[in-house]
């Protein structure tokens, strides 16, 4: 195993097998590590104090992948561990609050940065709600943009601001910053209500169907991603797809205009965008919103079924 050591903000980080091929276009682990080192000022404020789930690609996109929640025993002692109880067992999650930890994760072949929607300050109440929009077979990215605008209009009616980003795959994510005072169940219920409204408005293009084979030609609105312990590929996360796409924050006028594909934002292009626009997701960190207007529309008997 080829290894070297680098000093990152006073921490010594071991790097291994930097010439390992990760993406088929010739991008290696060295490219992966450098990307996260460079994007750190943008991604770290979003990851701050959130439990991280490692999704590792030790042999690149061509090899097998696996999820790892527990911090491995060999992790440096300076990495923050956070114990979280899950139905009778405790998992020690990584907390990624600094560049050294981010680079260490990249060296573990973690292409994506999967984080909780809640912070350590209150893990039982998320500070972000998400609408995960996934095109089924036969649906286009243009359909996704159209439905994203529909969901935005619904949220606007309730005076709730939302922030769009490419998933880095074929879909789109809407992030909705919250006051961290609502249970996971209530947030899931609120997003279910929004998804149901969108389906009623546009049943030919919106589905809440869990079975993939029954979604053909439609956009699936996955409100269940708001459950406790669920993680999302966060903004500025690389994705394990050809071309090394990045889950990239968008402006709503860009969604309205269209004319782009998720793959347009990738490891080679995203820094031109951040250099020009900065972090257009700053509101996700700074804004805190009530969803009482949505919860007032929900039958609490339905919430208990979630």
Image: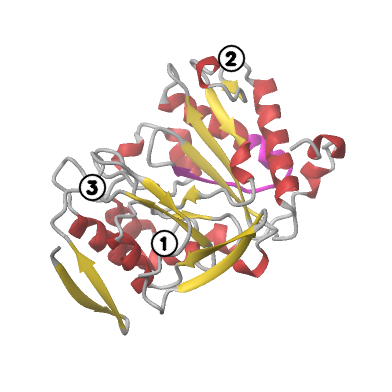
Q: Nearer the viewer, mark 3 or mark 2?
A: 3
Q: Is residue 296 above or below residue 7?
A: above
| Front position in the image: 1 or 9 | 1
Density class for disc 2 (Cα within 10 Å; few <14, some 14-19, many ≥20) is few
**Image: magenta residue range:** 153-166
Q: Which residue is mark 3?
A: 59
Q: Tag 1's secondary structure?
A: helix
Instruction: Name which quarter of the figure residue 295 lies in.
Output: top right
Q: Secondary structure at mark 3?
A: loop
Q: Can you tell which quarter of the image residue 110 is in?
A: bottom left
Q: Is residue 1 left or right of residue 263?
A: left
Q: Position of residue 178 (x, y in %)?
A: 67, 56
Q: Quadrant of the N terminus?
A: bottom left
Q: Residue 204's mark?
A: 2
Q: CA distance from mark 3 to mark 2?
A: 41 Å
Question: Residue 13, how many percent across, how many down?
Answer: 27, 74
Q: Earlier in the sequence, mark 1 or mark 2?
A: 1
Q: Nearer the viewer, residue 51 or 179?
A: 51
Query: Looking at the image, which is closer to me, 172 or 103?
Result: 103
Q: CA distance from mark 1 to mark 2?
A: 36 Å
Residue at point 50%, 71% (across, down): 81
Callout 2: helix, strand or loop? loop
Q: Which residue is mark 1?
A: 43
């Amino acid at each position: 195993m080829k290894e070297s050591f680098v000093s990152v903000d006073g921490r010594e980080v071991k790097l291994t097998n930097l010439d390992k091929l990760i993406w088929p276009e010739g991008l290696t682990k060295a490219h992966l590590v450098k990307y996260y080192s460079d994007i750190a000022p943008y991604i770290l404020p979003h990851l701050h104090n959130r439990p991280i789930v490692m999704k590792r690609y030790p042999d690149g996109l061509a090899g097998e992948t696996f999820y790892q929640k527990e911090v491995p025993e060999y992790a440096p002692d300076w990495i923050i561990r956070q114990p979280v109880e899950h139905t009778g067992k405790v998992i020690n999650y990584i907390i990624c609050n600094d560049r050294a930890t981010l680079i260490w994760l990249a060296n573990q072949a973690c292409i994506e940065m999967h984080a909780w929607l809640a912070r350590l300050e209150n893990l039982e109440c998320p500070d972000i709600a998400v609408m995960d929009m996934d095109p089924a077979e036969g649906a286009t990215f243009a359909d996704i943009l159209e439905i994203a605008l529909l969901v935005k209009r619904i949220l606007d009616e309730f005076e709730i601001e939302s922030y769009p980003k490419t998933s880095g795959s074929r879909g789109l994510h809407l992030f909705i910053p919250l006051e961290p005072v609502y249970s996971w169940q209530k947030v899931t219920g609120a997003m279910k209500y929004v998804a149901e409204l969108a389906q009623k408005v546009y049943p030919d293009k919106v589905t809440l169907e869990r079975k993939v084979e029954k979604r053909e030609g439609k956009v699936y609105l996955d409100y269940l991603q708001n459950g406790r312990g669920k993680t999302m590929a966060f903004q500025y996360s690389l994705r394990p797809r050809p071309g090394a796409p990045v889950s990239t924050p968008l402006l709503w006028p860009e969604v309205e205009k269209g004319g782009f594909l998720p793959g347009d934002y990738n490891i080679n292009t995203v820094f031109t965008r951040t250099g020009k626009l900065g972090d257009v997701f700053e509101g996700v960190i700074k804004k805190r919103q009530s969803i009482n207007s949505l919860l007032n529309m929900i039958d609490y008997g339905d919430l208990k079924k979630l």
